[in-house]
Amino acid sequence: MRSLVAALTICVCVLMAALARVATAAPPQPPAFSPTALATSPKVGLVFVACASANEVRTFDTTSANVVRVTPMPASPLGLTLSSDGASLYVTCAAPTSTVCIVNTATGKIAAT
């Protein structure tokens, strides 16, 4: 009986060690961005994407297909629109206090709220 218990104990230990290796070998999961809105600037080839769960607006360059800027927002961005000249991006942000942020598209900085 003791040898059976000892054998089971060893099996459980080996199994737990194997599971621990598998758990630590798993690749990290990418962050969730939850895109909620999109605005395009065909004049300069940019696409702005509101990422609600990340509280940011990401700017993509359509020629290079890369993110060229990440602009942090004070809350979840839910809506985007560009000014007619493309110089300002208007971002509606949700709770805790709903606000509209005006982002300078040349610098990626919030110019006003």
Image (cartoon, grey):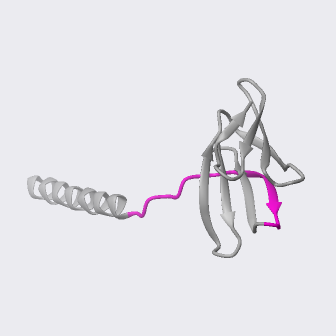
Horizontal side of 26 relative to 4 (left or right) equals right
In the rendered image, the residue lying farthest to the top is: 97
Front in this rendered view, residue 8 or 38:
38
In the rendered image, the residue lying farthest to the left is: 2
The image quadrant that residue 19 belongs to is: bottom left
Q: Is residue 46 magenta?
A: no
The residue depicted at 78 percent of the width and 51 percent of the height is 87
- Magenta stretch bounds: 26-43
Across and down, in percent, residue 11 comes to 21, 61
Across and down, in percent, residue 12 comes to 24, 56
Front in this rendered view, residue 14 or 56:
56
Front in this rendered view, residue 54 or 82:
82
Instruction: Look at the image and tell me in which quarter the N terminus lies.
Output: bottom left
The residue depicted at 70 percent of the width and 37 percent of the height is 111
The residue depicted at 60 percent of the width and 51 percent of the height is 70
- Majority secondary structure in the magenta region: loop
Horizontal side of 60 relative to 80 (left or right) equals left
Q: Is residue 113 above or below residue 108?
A: above
